[in-house]
Image (spheres, rainbow, N blue to C red):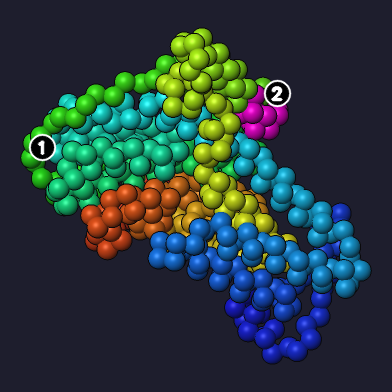
Amino acid sequence: MTMLSRLAFSLLLTSPTLALASGSGENTLNLTDHWVGFTAIAIFGISYLLVMAEEFTHLRKSKPVILAAGVIWALIAVVYQQNGVDHAAEVAVRHNLLEYAELMLFLLVAMTYINAMDERQVFEALRSWLVKKGFSLRQLFWITGLLSFLISPVADNLTTALLMCAVVLAVGGSNTRFVLIACINIVIAANAGGAFSPFGDITTLMVWQKNIQTTMGPVDFWSFFALFVPSLVNWLVPAVIMMFAVPNEQPAGGGEMVKMRLGARRIIGLFLLTIATAVSFHNFLHMPPVIGMLTGLAYLQFFGYYLKKRGARNINAGDPLHEEDPIAFDIFNKVARAEWDTLLFFYGVVLCVGGLGFIGYLSLASELMYIDWGATNANITVGLLSAIVDNIPVMFAVLTMMPDMSLGQWLLVTLTAGVGGSMLSIGSAAGVALMGQARGKYTFFGHLKWTPVIALGYAASIATHMWINASMF
């Protein structure tokens, strides 16, 4: 019986029965035909509609999913207690919380480093240099695209896209046509660059930290770099086509040069050292990568202490130390500036999807997609879904299903989930952010006109992966 027919049949039942199944050492209830299951789906659906409407309602996306997560698990707990299964739901929700905590702390360290580099004017210095050089619009199209592709694997795709968009607006802001095409190119390049690095996107980080084992070995840190060429193809195919629509004009250069503040280069070095520490903890010590990242946060804390003491020594007698001082540095200000809405949104998604999985719906979806359709078709569909729904819940659902796939298939779903969101402006955080930054110039429908070209790059990247990494399948 298909999932839809099961749901339709269950609506006719006024008192559905509960099936007990053994799972993870505890008795679990099959609630897919129960009113709690239907209610949970409805709650998650409504909350996600509110997330998608954030641009219009100005309701932060974390709020509805956090509420939905609490209500879903409360309903699950009530039914479990009524059926005398007291601890299964508790064990399941603690497991989800552990997964969230590892990812949240990892992202918090990465965001803190990015904020520290931003405060030391690393990104502003790069932006001012590009503006000052006076490149042509077509040159700027390629430079911003290439930098987006190369920076996003280390930083995140959102920060990279915002930086490159600032360059585009500063140089060609009056040319609406150029801004639109350049922003589309930046979104594609940033998403593609993030797909071949564990640090480039939340979804790749989720796959890496899951420590997935396949018949060809684990999906470890170095496995992701097999996606470099497919990711490059994903960006280059639409970029080459869009290039001919870019005006071949020479904008006026100018603008003041911005210098990086004291310690900027050393913070960049500490960030790279932190990444190396996280990889070493995972690969050599078999510890969670988050332990290495938190160790790396200590590097920044000690360096911040050094800058603070140095700033104090450089202040004239009687002048108080204030936060605008170019030398002073407070690590906790950088932690406070992390994207807490994103981190809390991630919490809501993990708990909501975990709840639906505990109810039993993800098992049904896994059977439909990965058994009936086949892994390749299912993974391509995951990428298409991520253009409409954020790739975080889509990827977390796949990881919760944990289908038995080869290394090549796990890399395929990592690729598609990472780059599929480029097909629509609302499909990735980078696209949504740029619609706000370049309001009126980069729009949903302006991006939609180029969707067939972007889809061509999507198909080409999948074909490239299945060709050059054929031995992994």
Identify the image quadrant of residue 154.
Answer: top left
Question: Percent position (x, y) of residue 156?
Answer: 45, 38
Based on the picture, tell me whether residue 319 belongs to the magenta stretch.
no
Residue at 63% from the left image edge and 84% from the top image edge: 8
Residue at 29% from the left image edge and 34% from the top image edge: 146
The reply to whether residue 455 is visible in this rendering is yes
Range of residues picked out in magenta: 286-295
Question: Percent position (x, y) of residue 251?
Answer: 10, 37
Q: Is the magenta region chiefly helix, strand or loop?
A: helix
Amino acid found under the numbered disc labelled 2 = Leu
Query: Would you call the spot at circle 2 few (<14 residues within 10 Å), some (14-19), or many (20 or more)?
Result: few
Question: Percent position (x, y) of residue 274?
Answer: 56, 23
On residue 285, the disc is 2
Of labels 2 and 1, earlier in sequence is 1
Query: Is 51 displayed left or right of 148 in the figure?
Result: right
Based on the picture, tell me whether residue 292 belongs to the magenta stretch.
yes
| Outermost residue to the right | 84
Q: Secondary structure at mark 1?
A: loop
| Outermost residue to the front | 318
Query: Which one is in front, 422 or 300?
Result: 300
Amino acid found under the numbered disc labelled 1 = Pro
Q: Give above or below for 100 relative to 254.
A: below
Residue at 61% from the left image edge and 28% from the top image edge: 293
Q: Secondary structure at mark 2?
A: loop
Label 1 sits on residue:
251
